[in-house]
Image: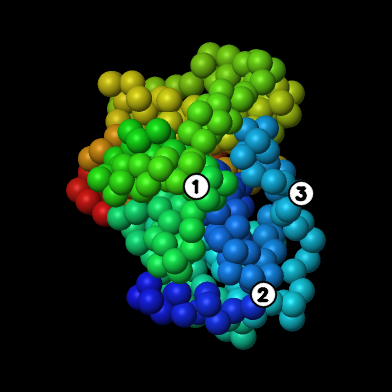
């Protein structure tokens, strides 16, 4: 792990920077990427963001989708490759090829399971969001945080703490949020974009989730196959939001949603209350994440097999899940 001083040096030395984040980017991924991009541009760097996926309606309000490059990244055009909010190379999807030993690479992340994938690594697992780390980096670079940067970073902070209620929320999250507000973060625009911008059309899928979720002891879960997902115009984000909602009930200690994104490939999203480390379960299934919010991509013949795989992994590792503190 490098010191912040070393990270500042690497950033100052670079002239043209390529920025990447994890697949299915949430607003922490986008906030940290777009926030850093704006800051580096202030230093006169040439910056390009590479993100293949389409933004959600709410994200389009906060982040300039047309500034994200969807095409190939010509590695010869850049002297620094930065990866934000991603704990493993596979999380970079189609851009994983940019992160090899030949390139000058840097990771800024807050996942405890980050396996130091770059030449330079700055990982702070006690940070609630990657945006909090980017705030620290921008401050160390002595770049003035304007209202636009502040708004983008606040969006990530708000998302990854679920409006300051997740277990990762701490005094520094509030401190950084306060500094961002003072710098002009438009918190009402962020709140509307993140929490109040869903179309009523999504209610059909939400009804399906509510009608079909299951409970097994202290665990609540839902599985959606590809056919249902397509018929009801469901999206992955709604499923993650749903597993988060299920874990809010007092009888439920952890929850998960599984959706079939491609035939035989299921995206798992898990949430838990404090005292239940579901990252342990996600890791056993080849994924990762945080103590109370984790996920994985798993292969199975059908949705029932995928659900049984997750349930049996929970049963087999229950003690470890309850005892693990990090
Ligand atoms: P979500 O449920 O919002 O999709 O993901 C919650 C967290 O789980 C993410 O912030 C990320 O840290 C982690 N996560 C989700 N999917 C994967 C995955 O496929 N692999 C890994 N390593 N982590 C994941
Ligand atoms: Mn994050």
Q: Is residue 206 above or below residue 180?
A: above
Q: Is residue 115 left or right of residue 34?
A: left
Residue 21 seen in this snapshot? no
| Residue 97 point in image, percent of width and height | 67, 72
**In the image, what residue occupies the spot 55% across and 82% down?**
13
Location of the N terminus by quadrant is bottom left
Q: Is residue 307 above or below residue 172?
A: above
Estimate the spatial distance between the alpha carbons at disc 1 and disc 2, rounded to whole Å.
Answer: 23 Å
| Residue that sits furthest to the bottom in the current view | 102
Give residue 166's mark. Answer: none
Give residue 16's mark. Answer: 2
Give residue 66's mark. Answer: 3
Q: Is residue 163 above or below residue 30?
A: above
**In the image, what residue occupies the spot 51% across and 16% down?**
210
Q: Which residue is mark 1?
A: 150
**Of the residues under marks 1 and 3, which one precedes in the sequence?**
3
Estimate the spatial distance between the alpha carbons at disc 1 and disc 3, rounded to whole Å.
Answer: 20 Å
Badge 3 element = helix
């Amino acid at each position: 792990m490098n010191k912040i001083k070393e990270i500042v040096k690497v950033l100052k030395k670079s002239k043209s920077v390529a920025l990447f984040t994890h697949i299915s980017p949430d607003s922490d991924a986008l906030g940290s990427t777009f926030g850093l991009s704006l800051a580096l541009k202030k230093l006169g760097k040439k910056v390009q963001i590479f993100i293949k996926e389409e933004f959600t309606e709410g994200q389009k309000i906060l982040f300039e989708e047309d500034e994200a490059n969807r095409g190939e990244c010509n590695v010869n055009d850049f002297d620094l490759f930065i990866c934000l909010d991603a704990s493993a190379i596979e999380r970079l999807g189609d851009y994983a090829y940019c992160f090899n030993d030949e390139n000058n690479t840097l990771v800024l992340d807050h996942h405890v399971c980050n396996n130091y994938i770059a030449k330079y690594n700055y990982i702070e697992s006690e940070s609630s969001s990657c945006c909090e780390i980017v705030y620290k980096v921008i401050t160390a670079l002595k770049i003035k945080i304007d209202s636009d940067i502040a708004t983008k970073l606040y969006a990530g902070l708000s998302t990854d703490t679920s409006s300051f209620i997740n277990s990762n929320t701490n005094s520094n999250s509030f401190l950084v949020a306060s500094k961002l507000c003072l710098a002009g973060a438009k918190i009402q625009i962020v709140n509307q974009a993140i929490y109040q911008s869903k179309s009523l059309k999504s209610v059909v899928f939400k009804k399906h989730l509510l009608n079909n979720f299951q409970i097994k002891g202290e665990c609540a879960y839902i599985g959606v196959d590809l056919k249902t997902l397509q018929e009801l115009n469901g999206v992955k984000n709604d499923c993650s939001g749903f597993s988060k909602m299920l874990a809010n009930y007092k009888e439920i200690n952890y929850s998960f949603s599984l959706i079939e994104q491609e035939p035989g490939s299921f995206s798992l999203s898990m949430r838990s209350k404090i005292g239940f480390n579901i990252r342990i379960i996600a890791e056993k299934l080849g994924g990762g994440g945080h103590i109370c919010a984790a996920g994985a991509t798993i292969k199975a013949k059908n949705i029932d097999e995928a659900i049984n795989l997750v349930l049996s992994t929970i049963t087999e590792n229950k003690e470890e899940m309850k005892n693990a503190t990090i």
